[in-house]
Image (spheres, rainbow, N blue to C red):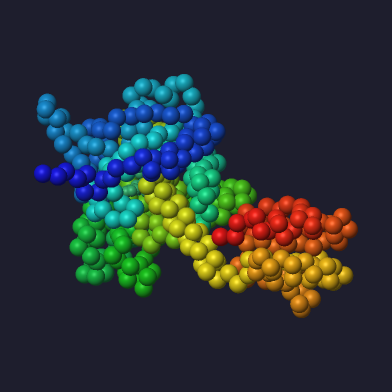
Amino acid sequence: MKFKSPRGTHDILPQQVGIFRRVVDTSRRLFERSGYREVVTPMFEENELFARSVGSETDIVQKEMYVFKDRAGRELALRPEGTASVIRSYLQHGLHANMDVQKLYYVGPMFRYDRPSAGRYRQFHQVGIEAIGSLSPYLDVECIAILRDLAKLLGIEEVDVLINSVGCRKCRPGYVEVLKEFLADRYDSLCSDCKTRYRSNPLRVLDCKKDHDLRCRSTIPVPMDYLCEECRHHFDEVRQILDSSGIPYALEPYLVRGLDYYTKTAFELVFKSFGAQNSLGGGGRYDDLVEMLGGSSTPAVGFSAGVERIILALEMIADSESKREEDKQKGRVVDVFFVITDESIRIPAFREMLKVRNILSVDMDFTGKSVKAQFRKADKLGVRFAVIFGTDEMNMGAVKVKDMKSGEEVDVSLEDLCDHLGEMKVE
Ligand code: HAM
């Protein structure tokens, strides 16, 4: 009998460990640079901890948890996320006593019995931070900034920050009433899951992937329009700080996230090239959770990011870069382009070009283009090297050779130009 890893799980093989470590090490460095300290919690907890914090009516708790009884009959669950465990640990060890704001981070495997697909696994890894003890909107922005910086540091540029406010226990019940009324009139058009959500947790209807029609064609009420004064003020402040910190974001009024503990700010970082499962990470404020788990009223905010999702994005970027390079090579018309910075240099440059053509394909501009436009043309021709004939260099009998791939420039004497280019590998 041959064994395979269980469905939705995967081995990280030696050739993949490098990239996995790079994501985790970069996260650790970034978190620690921002004042967060690592906490390591068990991979399983009492089942009740997640039911109470993530929410007993969420998909995660209803459908995705690995719940089991140990030999003594205790009901336990593999952790589907890290926040509940961090808060449990914070309370159990009285971490609030020695610091006004506790900044904690974690790295480790999480478990969700979800339908496996690209970027969605049953065991996956998260890196995450939690700042516990302050209502300051600056901390909301700090979390968003760290999540975005993490992607950027790893080389993922094409990301969007989506933000929303989901209100608090004061204003949300009023909003939920309005939403229920709205849904009641359209009950028959809801999917079967949303019919259940309508009764147990109507907010979840907003992030149903099946009810696109309902969302698009109608004027479904959104939490942002029903915020109380305090939530509205907090959200305005978060937006102002994002603006003044130069962090671009988009408002996403349907963003309610799949966990019940959120209050006020909710955010996600999405990678534009992913289709579904496009969230690299997400988080938000959860000002009631500490109290819900038995502590005193303590506001908190945090996020976590999926390591496998980040790796997938990095692989997609590497693939498209190598494809672009391949396309460029396929479309290459000549190997080298001669750029002249002044018309007076055309004669020596032309003479050199004829020489170099003995060993490589070379071209230059014959229409009096500006230097910038000559470079644009070189790019269009997909050349590997540009040889720049500048007046100063020419007075010293030299030119600059620019590697168009790396951008590196070297001075080469005219005498050596043929040999130099001949030695350069033109793949
Ligand atoms: P979450 O949105 O459920 O939030 O998960 C965060 C990230 O984990 C997602 O954006 C995604 O990258 C990754 N992820 C989630 N499920 C899977 C899966 N099945 N396979 C692969 N990757 C996955 C939380 O977990 C909250 N605890 C975040 C938080 C921290 N909020 C406040 N503090």
Residue 135: x, y in percent?
A: 49, 38
Residue 332: x, y in percent?
A: 58, 69
| Left or right of residue 314: residue 397 | right
Q: Residue furthest front?
A: 358
Residue 321: x, y in percent?
A: 50, 59
| Tag count | 0
Task: Name the residue rendered at 41%, 48% in the picture.
Answer: 311
Residue 42: x, y in percent?
A: 29, 29
Q: Nearer the viewer, residue 67 or 397?
A: 397
Q: Nearer the viewer, residue 155 or 427?
A: 427
Q: Nearer the viewer, residue 128 or 425?
A: 425
| Left or right of residue 151: residue 65 | left
| Left or right of residue 25: residue 342 | right
Where is the N terminus found, in terms of image quarters? top left
Residue 155: tell me if it is visible.
yes
- State which quadrant residue 105 falls in: top left
Where is the C terminus found, in terms of image quarters? bottom right
Residue 342: tell me if it is visible.
no
Q: Residue furthest bottom?
A: 367
